Image (cartoon, rainbow, N blue to C red):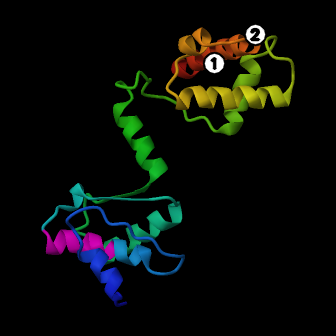
């Protein structure tokens, strides 16, 4: 399938970042796979120096299938195509020691987090779903602000904050032990 002039421009533009912004079914994946082929064939890049990152597993699968055809299987060897989540996990797996993690770490989803915090806060927070959600939100905010449990405790302004900071410390210690 041929590219329209805007798509062709995006494929051939290699002097900096290029945002491909368009609606569903408009050819974004085709542009990206053609750009990868252009970088390999037209610009001499090695596939192992190219990373194509997308949001969905479906789009990543489509890119892998198309890239096997567009640049050719041999040329595409070493090309990295993944979702943002998979890329992040791969980086963590490679750099676990630098992150202070164990090599056999586990990923926790929302359900795991709620179950663990219920267990860790038994006796500290009454069986109150709203309060537990507030704790989860507060811990998330502290993590987003790069606050350690000790910093959260030091900045606590009341009894609830002190309890939440203590729970954050328990949670953080447990997560590091996993």
Asked if residue 42 is among those painted magenta in the image, a careful observer would answer yes
User: Label 2: how many residues lie within 10 Å, few (<14), some (14-19) or many (20+)?
Assistant: few
Residue 71 in sight from this viewpoint: no
- Magenta range: 33-43
As drawn, the label of residue 42 is: none
Q: Residue at x 48, y 67 (%)?
A: 59
Between marks 2 and 1, how big is the CA–CA gap?
A: 14 Å
| 122 within the magenta span | no
Write down the quadrant of residue 92 in the picture.
top left
Which numbered disc flags the more N-terminal residue, 2 or 1? 2
Report the residue at 60% width, 35% height from top: 108
Which residue ends up furthest to the left in the rendered image? 44
- The main secondary structure of the magenta stretch is helix
Which residue corresponds to mark 1? 168
Residue at (19% x, 65% y) in the render: 15
On the picture, is 11 further left or further right than 138? left
Compare residues 101 and 134 and report the one nearer the observer. 134
Snapshot quadrant of residue 115: top right
Is residue 178 rendered to the left or right of residue 95?
Answer: right
In the rendered image, residue 123, in percent from the top left (x then y), is placed at 82, 11
SS at circle 2: helix
Q: Residues within 10 Å of mark 1 (few under 14, many from 20)?
A: many
In the picture, measured across the screen, residue 34 lies left or right of residue 41, that is right
Q: Residue 125: horizontal and vertical position, in percent?
A: 81, 16
Residue, disc 2 = 159
Residue 171: where, in percent of width, then height?
63, 19
Please tell me which residue lies in front, 87 or 168.
168
Asked which secondary structure carries label 1, the reply is helix
24 shown above or below 103:
below
């Amino acid at each position: 399938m041929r590219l329209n002039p805007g798509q062709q421009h995006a494929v051939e533009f290699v002097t900096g970042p290029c945002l491909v912004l368009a609606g569903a079914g408009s050819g974004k994946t085709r542009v990206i796979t053609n750009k990868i082929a252009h970088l390999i064939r037209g610009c001499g890049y090695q596939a192992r120096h190219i990373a194509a990152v997308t949001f969905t597993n479906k789009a990543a699968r489509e890119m892998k299938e198309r890239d096997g055809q567009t640049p050719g299987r041999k040329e595409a060897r070493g090309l990295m195509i993944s979702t943002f989540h998979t890329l992040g996990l791969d980086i963590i797996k490679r750099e676990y020691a630098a992150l202070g993690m164990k090599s056999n770490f586990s990923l926790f989803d929302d359900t795991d987090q709620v179950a663990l915090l219920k267990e860790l806060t038994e006796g500290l927070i009454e069986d109150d779903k709203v309060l537990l959600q507030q704790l989860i939100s507060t811990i998330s905010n502290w993590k987003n602000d790069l606050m350690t449990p000790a910093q959260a405790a030091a900045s606590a302004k009341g009894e609830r904050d002190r309890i939440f900071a203590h729970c954050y410390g328990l949670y953080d210690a447990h997560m590091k032990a996993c």
